[in-house]
Image (cartoon, rainbow, N blue to C red):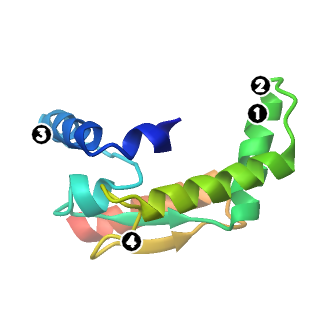
Amino acid sequence: AVSQVAAHPDVRHEMVGRQREIMDQGDWVCDGRDIGSVVFPGAEVKVFLTASVDERARRRHAELVARGENVDLRAIRDDVERRDLADSSRASSPLVVADGATVVDTTGMGIDEVVSRIARMAREVTA
């Protein structure tokens, strides 16, 4: 339901303000589909994480199965595609690669590899 709620400009406006208030209180790592493009376009490090639809569906399926949920992989894949379309085509804060962001395709990567790559990028920028 996040995509449906986020499509409302008043909701996005309120959330952006609140996110900025929180982030103004220190150094943070933040993620979301419009963080680098709308919420914090001046961030020192901007990363656009992506993976194939099949990979993201597989990961979500494994997560839900580990929680004991009985879920259909095809239905999850369809939901991932629907959410991508909804988020990239909405009028308010659409999903886009932010100016200055580094695109990291995580297809086939493990979490430790992804974290190491982003941490290395952050060290390079802040060094």
Gap between marks 2 and 3, in whole Å? 35 Å
Q: Earlier in the sequence, mark 1 or mark 3?
A: 3
> Which element is circle 3 on?
loop
Q: Which mark is residue 97?
A: 4
Q: Earlier in the sequence, mark 4 or mark 2?
A: 2
Q: Earlier in the sequence, mark 4 or mark 3?
A: 3
Gap between marks 4 and 1, in whole Å? 28 Å
Label 4 with label 3: CB-CB less than 8 Å: no
Gap between marks 1 and 3, in whole Å? 34 Å
> Which element is circle 2 on?
loop
What's under tag 3, amino acid-wise? Asp
Gap between marks 2 and 1, in whole Å? 5 Å
Q: Which residue is mark 2?
A: 67
Q: Characterize the local packing of mark 3: few (<14), some (14-19) or many (20 or more) Cα atoms within 10 angstroms.
A: few
Label 2 with label 1: CB-CB less than 8 Å: yes
Is residue 127 visible in the rendered image? The answer is no
Residue 118 at x, y percent in the picture = 44, 62
Q: Characterize the local packing of mark 2: few (<14), some (14-19) or many (20 or more) Cα atoms within 10 angstroms.
A: few
Q: Which residue is mark 1?
A: 64
Q: Observer-nearest residue: 77 or 110?
A: 77
Residue 101 at x, y percent in the picture = 34, 72
Q: Is residue 21 above or below residue 53?
A: above
> Which element is circle 4 on?
loop
Q: Is residue 30 above or below residue 108?
A: above
Residue 77 position by quadrant:
bottom right
Q: Earlier in the sequence, mark 2 or mark 3?
A: 3
Kindly identify the residue that appears in the image at 32 percent across and 46 percent down.
29
Label 4 with label 1: CB-CB less than 8 Å: no
Q: Which residue is mark 3?
A: 24
Q: Quadrant of the C terminus?
A: bottom left
What's under tag 2, amino acid-wise? Arg
